[in-house]
Image (tube, rainbow, N blue to C red):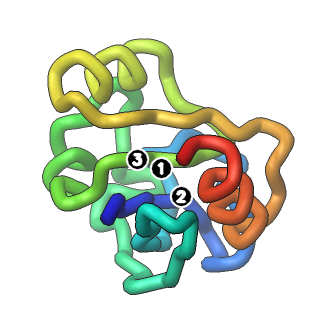
């Protein structure tokens, strides 16, 4: 089972801002059969104006149980640290509009 966190400001669409600035993280579990279910809507205590670029430690603490992070934008240094320091998978989905579309594409394309 893989946990996927998707950044959103309205719980429906992907946030247009950097992943770490999202107001919410919509958490899904994806199984080996590519089935997924939403398990949580987690408020980001560092979202909005509270988050500074490249400060990924706090976000990683909030999402320590997740293995994959999907957002429309993510800093290059944050992506590097997510991969190298935490051995997790960042995905930038610039052309994806909704949370549902993002998890659907992930379950079909990456598993």
- SS class of the residue under badge 1? helix
Where is 31 relative to 16, above or below? below
Question: Does the CB distance between marks 3 and 2 fall below 8 Å?
Answer: no
The x and y percentages for residue 80 are: 35, 15
Say whether disc 3 or disc 1 marks the residue closer to the N-terminus: 1
Q: Residues within 10 Å of mark 2 (few under 14, many from 20)?
A: many
How far separated are the C-alphas under marks 3 and 1? 16 Å
Question: Does the CB distance between marks 3 and 1 fall below 8 Å?
Answer: no
Q: Residue at x 34, y 25 (%)?
A: 54
Asked if residue 88 can be seen in this view, the reply is: yes
Q: Residue at x 22, y 29 (%)?
A: 87
Where is 66 relative to 84, above or below? below
The x and y percentages for residue 67 are: 31, 48
Tell me the tag on residue 7: 2
Tell me the tag on residue 21: 1
The x and y percentages for residue 88 are: 29, 35
Say whether disc 1 or disc 2 marks the residue closer to the N-terminus: 2
How far separated are the C-alphas under marks 3 and 2? 11 Å
Where is 47 relative to 83, above or below? below
């Amino acid at each position: 089972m893989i946990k996927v966190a998707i950044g959103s400001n309205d719980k429906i669409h992907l946030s247009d801002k950097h992943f770490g600035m999202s107001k919410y993280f919509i958490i899904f579990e994806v199984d080996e059969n590519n089935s997924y279910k939403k398990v949580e809507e987690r408020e980001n205590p560092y979202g909005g104006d509270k988050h500074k670029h490249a400060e990924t430690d706090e976000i990683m603490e909030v999402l320590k149980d997740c293995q994959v992070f999907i957002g429309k934008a993510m800093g290059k240094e944050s992506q590097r640290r997510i991969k190298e320091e935490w051995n997790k998978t960042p995905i930038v989905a610039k052309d994806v509009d909704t949370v549902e579309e993002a998890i659907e594409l992930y379950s079909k394309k990456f598993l």
